[in-house]
Amino acid sequence: MTSELKPDPLKSDHWRSAVKYSPFYNKIKEHDYVNEWHRWAEYTTPTVLEDTTIEYFAIRNSASIFDITPMSKYRIKGPDALDFMNRLLPRDMTKIRVGRVAYTVWCDDEGMVIDDGTVFRVADDEYLLCAQERQMETLRRNAVGFDIEYSEVTDEIAAISFQGPCTCKILKNMGFNDVETMKMFDVRFFDFPGGEIMISRSGYTGDLGYEIWTKNDQAEALWDAIYAGGKDYAIRPIGGNALEIARIEAGLIAAKIEFSPANETVRAGHAKSPYELGLGWLVKLDKGVAFNGRRALIKEKEKGSRYRFVKLDVEGNKAATNAYLFDKEDGKSIGYVSSAAWAPSAKTNLALGFVDMPYGEVGDIVWAEIYYQKELKWNKRWAKCTVMKDPAWNPPRKTLTPPEDF
Amino acid sequence: MTDNTNKSYDVIIVGGGHNGLVCAAYLAKAGKKVVVLEAENQVGGAAITGELSYGKKVSSCAQFLNQLNGKVSKDLNLTKHGLKLSASNISTIALDADGDHMRLTKNSVKGGGINETDAENYKEFMSLMHEYAATLGFLIDLPPMDIFNLDWDDKVSAMKLGWKLRFGLGAEKMSELLRMIGMNIRDVLDDEFDNEHLKGALSFDAVLGTHTGPYSPGNFLNFLYRIAAGKAGAVDIPEGGMGAVTEAMSNAAIANGAEVRTGARVKSIDVDNCAVTGVTLEDGEVLSAEIVASNANMKTTVYDMVGTRHFEADFVKRIGDIRMRGAAAKLHIALRDLPDFKGLAKDDLKNRLVIAPSQDQVERAFNHVKYGEVSTSPMMEISIPSVVDSSLTEKGHVLSATVQYAPYELKGGWTDQAKADFLETCINRIAEFAPDIREHIEHAELITPKDLEDRFGLVGGNWHHGELTLDQMLMLRPVPEASRYALPLDGMYICGAGAHPGGGVMGAAGRNAAQAILKGEEK
């Protein structure tokens, strides 16, 4: 890429190309060897920069940087902000104090999940909502009758997910005092040239990690500061492929993989409820106020769900990608695998998937029909799968406060 | 006013329109402790008789009684409670500027240069319409089927409907009904008749109270609905104006033990822990009940009285999306004496006088409203009830007319000047048929669609509280989640025209809602 064509992410370049460039784009590009990028919302985002396995191990063994600027970000502010969030989300939002972030899903009236994401309570009357998919329409129809203002700030906030066992140490080296006292899901603001930046102890890897939120024009300075603070810690920017392995290993679901967003799903039975995604713990039916999906979820709780989300320990070493699930070998089809990967740290062959109720209780055995290629020839194998209770990767360091010092 | 010792009810009804009163009467009859809270100083909602001037009274909004539900009338014994008709089964006279008027009854058409073929076709056509109306009419008295969760009653009415369509009507007529049901009135009438004046008058019945012109899709159904939801097309004039109808309903409610309070404006319907707890009045008084039924407009109920936050967002969105555009204004004239309608005797003036000379004229009148203008040559349905009802005036007469079309949102706004100008247009229009009318006018007033909203709570100026179109009828009315009168909020019901079977002074929505409330309690 010649210097003339080098995108300037701080300018509106929409006339030049059909993709947007994150403020971190030029920094990431310096580490890009294989030129594999894909579209994430309007942004171009790396699939892999050098080698997926090496990038994955940066998450688990040192420090990784993943650009999450393309995530949909919204600011909700006003006297009714708490009531608004409490009606939008099934969680009891009165429990989420200022300075905390919460993982949540949100549903339509039928109790089907529209999307999942994180909610940052940045002030008494202000939240930041971070979502996988675009949510302006959801916010628009939810805002009717509430004294709030809401706006999309996706393009105004540059953000990275900084994950790995050494990340706390690096942040400390950068001068973010007391960052080590942050508990899981804490949010704090820190001084930084150009204005305060927001750091949350959160992530999508099941590991120690932080997400750092800045203004666009601070992005490159932040990047340089991280590299300066972490010069001895093998920091590595990563692509989506490495992150995908980490999130499967941690048993975390993904929109458009584990569930089809309810607001763009037309076929009956193709959307899923929080209970069916194994996220019943997010639903507080008796919080005393109406929230989207409440009536349907009460019914579902009474009548039972259709599907069960399962984390599977799959026998053998063949990834159960796209496999159907059966009650026994050559038995009745009871479900499917939605995500599968060899988990390098947990050293298990993992799959996430769904089975019809009442199959798939913890400890139960189901069978996966796995198709795989060997020297171009397709083979089939039946693999015994055990339904796991906990995520394959859930180390104490994820939540340990203060984190280990390296 | 009640004293402060007793503020707890089984059911509170918000709004004392005709449906609210009917609902209360049925509930009280079933032994419930009910109160109706009416904001105004008289009950009746949009079915009231108001002062015009010089001691003259007139029906302020609705003016004819053509859809009063037979079951309501009988169950509540409205005659015993004071309902009298000053004229029944009146004809429609389609006015002609040259005095060659056309007279229409349920099954005959005469005059106005009608030829034998058209007269014969009219008889046949109307008989088919009445057959269709009789086939579908039973749906009016039932809650819409819950097609997602059919109960036994739903299955019975589904079978009844199927049976009536296929074996009652027979294959040929059923097929014809299915062909016609989604059509516009113009195509239907052009298929049947040649006479433009006849078609004009009939098309007017299809567009009355709607935001459609003869060409607009789907309004044949409106034409049919007028007959199906009524007393087989009969048009009556209640003695004392429409207020007398609601007064009789109020009497019936009170006689059955309901409390009816006027001047009791509900500020909010109160909710605690996802269930209704009662209401708070504007003066701060709190009344409690586990069930509240709103006779108010759906949007008013959900947005203003309960509050959107007590409902889930998709439901709120759907309520906001209900189309309720009114395009009719109301004209009231106090007359010193009867004007001379060319070619009509005094006795003819008790009838329903319609100005709709041709379908093209109706359509052209409609064109304006699409662009926020008033019709330059409006269509009208005129009543001079004082001809048969001396209780309305000591001397002289009152003329009341529904005028189409006037937009809810007028370009430039409904200023005093704009109102005065349109009033002039309307009087000029009547003068085309009764040239001496100006000499007799004591006072004239125009009620715009915006006024209808302000005075009667008819949001958008639509007197059906939601346009009656196929996508807003039956199990889709007002929205699928509330089609059985219960809203998705524990204890909250609707009982007004916004629910099935819609507006027009029927009382059927109130009756159906009362039954839904009673049935809900059994569970």
Image: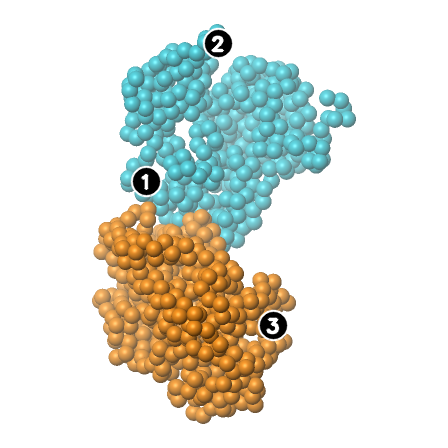
Type of residue at label 3? Thr
Report the front residue among B250 and A158: B250
What is the quadrant of the N terminus of chain A in the image? top right
Q: How many marks?
A: 3
Q: Is residue B342 left or right of residue A235?
A: left
Depth check: B53 or B140 in front?
B140
> Which residue position holds label 2?
A376
Residue A176 horizontal/vertical position (percent): 60, 29
Q: Secondary structure at mark 2?
A: loop
Same chain for marks 2 and 3? no
Q: Which chain is orange?
A: B
Q: Does residue B444 appear anywhere in the picture? A: no
- Residue reaching furthest front? B116
Mark 2 residue type: Leu
Above/below status of B338 relative to A130: below
Q: Position of residue A238 (x, y in %)?
A: 58, 20
Dot in front, 1 or 2: 2
Identify which amino acid the numbered label 1 is placed on: Glu
Residue at which label 1 appears: A300
Q: Which mark is residue B119?
A: none
Please say if the residues under marks 1 and 2 sit with CB atoms less than 8 Å apart: no
Q: Is residue B266 depicted above or below B83 in this figure?
A: above
Q: Chain of mark 3?
A: B
The chain letter for the residue carrying disc 1 is: A
**Crowding at label 1, few (<14), some or many (≥20) Cα neighbours within 10 Å?**
some
Residue occupying image coordinates x 52% and y 53%: A147
